[in-house]
């Protein structure tokens, strides 16, 4: 919940993929800042190719427009399920991206690119493999189960082994 005034101009923004598919609709006083949050936190952020903004004179009118847009335009990553008892929670993870991170990091560790003890962070790993931080984190958690990494501190993992365990 924001403490900003409700009479401040607010944008309804839409995020599209390269083929024009609507991925997400949101509302914000600062869509650029909000995009940066999505870019680092959402598993689907790497799919975004276009952002549009539609400005409204105040927050209540923007929130009404956002709600109507979600209901009629049906974005792929629709958050309206949070506000209803019947909505299905969308898949939050990019399974293909997760496997890309697991394969890529495992290969790099196996090849000696990272020494035991080296620290890897979910944000930079996600950017390098073109996935969201959540997807990189999920991949790195799975690599922890395989004995390659250990969660060290808030999104930072230490390399534990130079090869995956066979158990």
Image: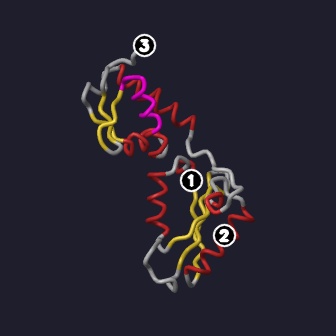
Q: Position of residue 76 (x, y in %)?
A: 66, 53
Q: Is residue 141 magenta?
A: yes
Q: Earlier in the sequence, mark 1 or mark 3?
A: 1
Disc number for residue 67: 2
Q: Is residue 30 left or right of residue 15?
A: left
Other-residue count near label 3 (Cα within 10 Å), few / some / many at <14 / 14–19 / ≥20: few
Please tell me whether the stretch drawn in magenta is mainly helix, strand or loop. Answer: helix
Q: Which mark is residue 166?
A: 3
| Helix, strand or loop status at disc 2 | helix
Which residue in the rendered view is the most extreme toward the front? Answer: 85
Residue drawn at 46 percent across, 52 percent down = 41
Where residue 133 appears, x then y in whole percent?
44, 45
Residue 22's quadrant in the figure?
bottom right
Residue 140 lies within the magenta run: yes
Q: Residue at x 49, y 68 (%)?
A: 31
Q: CA distance from mark 1 to mark 3?
A: 38 Å
Q: Which mark is residue 48?
A: 1
In magenta, the rendered stretch is: 138-148
The mark nearer the N terminus, 2 or 3, is 2
Please provide percent x and percent y for residue 95.
Answer: 57, 36
C-alpha span from label 1 to label 2: 21 Å
Label 2 neighbourhood size at 10 Å, few (<14), some (14-19), many (20+)? some
The residue depicted at 39 percent of the width and 46 percent of the height is 123
Marks 2/3: CA distance?
A: 50 Å
Identify the secondary structure beneath mark 1.
Answer: strand
Q: How is the image coloured?
A: secondary structure
Give coordinates of residue 73: x percent, y percent.
72, 62
Q: Residue furthest right?
A: 72
Which residue is outermost to the top?
A: 166
């Amino acid at each position: 919940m924001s403490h900003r005034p409700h009479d401040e101009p607010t944008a309804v923004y839409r995020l599209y993929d390269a083929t024009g598919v609507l991925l997400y609709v949101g509302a914000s006083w600062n869509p650029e800042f909000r995009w940066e949050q999505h870019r680092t936190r959402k598993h689907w952020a790497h799919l975004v190719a276009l952002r549009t903004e539609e400005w409204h004179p105040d927050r209540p009118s923007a929130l009404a427009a956002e709600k109507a847009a979600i209901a009629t335009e049906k974005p792929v990553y629709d958050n309206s399920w949070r506000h209803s008892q019947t909505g299905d929670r969308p898949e939050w993870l990019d399974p293909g991206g997760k496997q890309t991170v697991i394969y890529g990091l495992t290969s790099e560790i196996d090849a000696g690119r990272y020494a035991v003890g080296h620290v890897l962070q979910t944000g930079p790993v996600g950017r390098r493999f073109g996935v969201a931080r959540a997807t990189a984190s999920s991949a790195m958690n799975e690599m922890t189960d395989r004995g390659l990494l250990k969660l060290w501190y808030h999104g930072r993992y230490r390399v534990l082994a130079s090869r995956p365990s066979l158990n």
